[in-house]
Amino acid sequence: MQENLNQMAKDNAQSFIEWFKELMNYSLFNLGESNITLGLIITLSVSFIALFVITEWIRRFTVHKVLKRYQIDTGTKQSIGTMIKYFLILAGVFSILQTNGIDLSAFGILAGALGVGIGFGLQNITNNFISGLIILFEQPIKVGDRIEVGDVSGDVIKISARSTMIVTNDNISIIVPNSQFIDSQVINWSHNERKIRFNFPVGVSYKEDPQKVKAILMEVAKKNKGVLDTPEPDVLFEDYGDSSINFNLRVWTSEYINRPKILKSQLYYEIFRRFGEDGIEIPFPQRDLHLKSGFENMSK
């Protein structure tokens, strides 16, 4: 009795295995000389998922472990890691297809169909992808850069194949197509180094001593921790305005590249306080009204 049960179990297991093999070998369609089966589709799917997971791990390992040992800025590290990932994905895809016996010559037909698709509706996607490669190689922008493109201003936090992610000072993420960085004018505040100069206008009354005003502005700038000592700040006598003599306070900073209004506010608060202590008058716009003769007779 027990032997019969064991034999039945073996027969059922054998039947299941044969059924599973038939299912996996079930032909779905032909691609050139390659027979595409259900099992092959599953194998390719698992292989591609593993490829993307492994290449992403290699990218992170390269950026955070290998390149960390060298004096390379963060944006360049990210670009190198991304290019390595794309290269490994491309090599891995062809390797997986060849290993599984896929006839690669059949992809000539798919390439032709893809060309037609690009001609009809995929121009933007292709343009953005190629622009992404140009950005990674030429590096007009990098991760960590402070940029302005169009009406968007913020820090670059990610450059992908199709788009670039920018975070504004309000912590809003904006996705910008890569082609916009190639076709449009881009202002990169930190392309060479993270050190830039800001210009802050200051106006005082005509009765004030320009040398005293300059001394106060220089003192305020040098006391601010966000202002660099080298290059040192300076003050320009800008022009004679309608109601004031105007100065230009020029300061260098590396801390407030992405927060210029914060630095401006700090300096203006302190300048206003110092002007009040030293009796420096900040004028307001004044206009003189001249009435033509005969105006009173007209009003009567």
Image (tube, grey):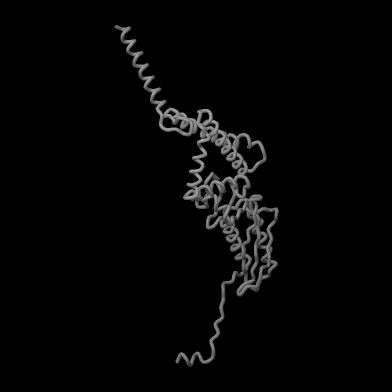
For the residue pair 267 and 260, the one nearer the viewer reads as: 260
Query: Residue 143 location, x and y as percent?
Result: 58, 46
* In the displayed structure image, the side of residue 247 where residue 296 appears, left or right: left
Q: In which quadrant of the rendered image does the N terminus lie?
A: top left
Q: Residue furthest front?
A: 33
* In the displayed structure image, the side of residue 175 where residue 2 appears, left or right: left
Which residue is at 70% across, 67% downward?
211
Query: Residue 36 location, x and y as percent?
Result: 44, 31
Which residue is at 49% across, 33% downward?
48
For the residue pair 218 and 122, the one nearer the viewer reads as: 122
Residue 171, can we see it?
no
Instruction: Determine the image quadrant of residue 41.
Output: top left
For the residue pair 150 and 229, the one nearer the viewer reads as: 150
Q: Residue furthest left?
A: 1
Query: Residue 66 location, x and y as percent?
Result: 63, 34
Q: In which quadrant of the rendered image does the C terminus lie?
A: bottom left
Which residue is at 70% across, 56% downward?
232
* In the displayed structure image, the side of residue 298 where residue 218 appears, left or right: right
Query: Residue 19 location, x and y as percent?
Result: 37, 22
Judge whether 214 appears above or below 171 on screen: below
Residue 121, can we see it?
yes
Q: What number of labels is visible?
A: 0
